[in-house]
Amino acid sequence: MRKNLNVIYAYTIMLGLIILVGIFQSWNVALSILNMCLISAVMTMGANIQWGYAGLINFGIMGYTALGGLAAVLISVAPVQEAWQAGGFNIIMCIWLIVAMVVIIKFILKNFKKSKIRSYIIAGIIIGGIIFIRITSEQSIEAIESVNPATTGFLGGLGLPIVFSWIVGALFAAGLAFIVGKVALGLRADYLAIATLLISEIVIAIIKHEDWLTRGVKNVVGLKRPVPYEIELQTKEWFINLVARFNSGKLELISNLSDKQAALNQLVIEGSSVFVKLCYSGLFLIVVLILLIITQKALYSPWGRMMRAIRDNEEAANAMGKNVVKQHLLIFILGSAIVGIAGAMLVTQDGLFTPGSYRPMRYTFLIWVMVIVGGSGNNFGAILGGFAVWFLWIEAAPIALFLINLFTSGLPETNALKAHLLESVPYFRYLMMGIGLLLIMRYRPKGILPEKIEIK
């Protein structure tokens, strides 16, 4: 217990800060921060597996997050029958054609020696296949996108519970990671970072512009929830009684019956939002705990020790007979799959899919800051980094506003400096993030909770 005191202290402080937000701002805000912290923690665990365990630089986190969000759409949205009738069959045929092309090319590469003729045949298959797919799919895509474009204009999904998309999001991300890993993992670290970033940009571009699949920048809204809706809770007698019992002290102070009923109605409205967020918190916490247990077991297993040995000295590990390339590919796939889960969780909470919102600053570099601040190679550190950085990211503006009002309280409202500072409040989050990162790098260069090498 004593050796884990720093972990206990760090998480206690973090939990205390979230509770303070609930006390001084609102519990809705506090729970919103908590839920996003939990989702960020899943992302940081995925990035930590790749960087902390194996030393792989993946700047494509944004792309895997978007694939998780796409999985939420394809799983939960009901199929659009008119769109399927308009061109769904041709789209399926084109997908199978792509699969057939991949299989044929792989067969040629495996069974024929390298030569100009082989290269020409492969080039011909690719070019011919692209032309045929283009001709076959163009009219079908136009027909699909013209089916009630204001609300649908795409094929839709399977109409299943959205929680299933968390698993499918992991599979989508793992599939892309397999392809990327086969192509890019042999590159030097800096080239790997560039390659993964560019591939993720390609993924985002496809998701944004293929309206038949994702509605593109028109967004998908109204996704089904795995938790109750607020408006439904507000009409349930058991919930109204629960709120009344929980706030009995406040309600007893009101003598007028109509005023008491109005106060109860307001409390029910506020309580329904808190209850829904608590349900999300429970779901997300279960995922975080499961992943934490699995990653901790993996970290201190023989496989985890092997990955750290490969990370610290690839040449020595290779000389001892370890298949470095295979292990790098495996851990790249595992880390990306976890990020895919987080992407599906994020869309599940928001209830909408917005491809235009996936930007490198938010979904790649901020995640890296979380891992670095928390402590790479330490699962508890990575999770803490997700909590701390996201908390600061959200609360930077309120904290900056409070400090500006405090230090300029003696100045009139028309003062130019005070007005300029108040207008610049939204940008203080970047300043505070930069200062925080500099302080961590100066005084805790290995993160708040650095990696601990333990043999179990």
Image (cartoon, rainbow, N blue to C red):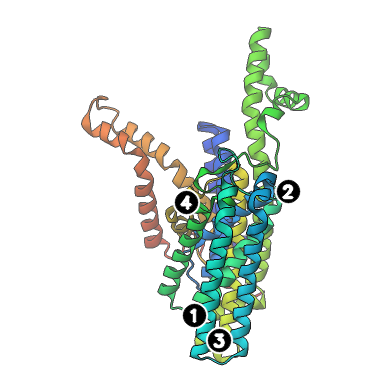
- Mark 2 → mark 4, Cα distance in angstroms: 34 Å
Residue 273 % position (x, y): 63, 32
- Give x and y (percent) for residue 156: 65, 48
Q: CA distance from mark 1 to mark 2?
A: 39 Å
Mark nearer the viewer, 2 or 4: 2
**Which tag, 3 or 2, sits closer to the chain's start?**
2
From the image, tell me which residue sits under label 1: 186
Q: Amino acid at mark 2?
A: Leu
Q: Amino acid at mark 4?
A: Val
For marks 4 and 3, the one nearer the N-term is 3
Mark sitting earlier along the chain (3/1): 1
Question: For residue 160, which numbered disc appears in the image?
Answer: 2
Circles 2, 4 touching at the beta carbon (< 8 Å): no
CB under 8 Å between discs 3 and 1: no
Q: Is residue 24 above or below residue 370?
A: above
Which badge, 2 or 4, is on the more N-terminal residue? 2
User: Residue 317 got which mark?
Assistant: 3
Quadrant of the image occupied by residue 331 = bottom right
Screen quadrant of the C terminus: bottom right
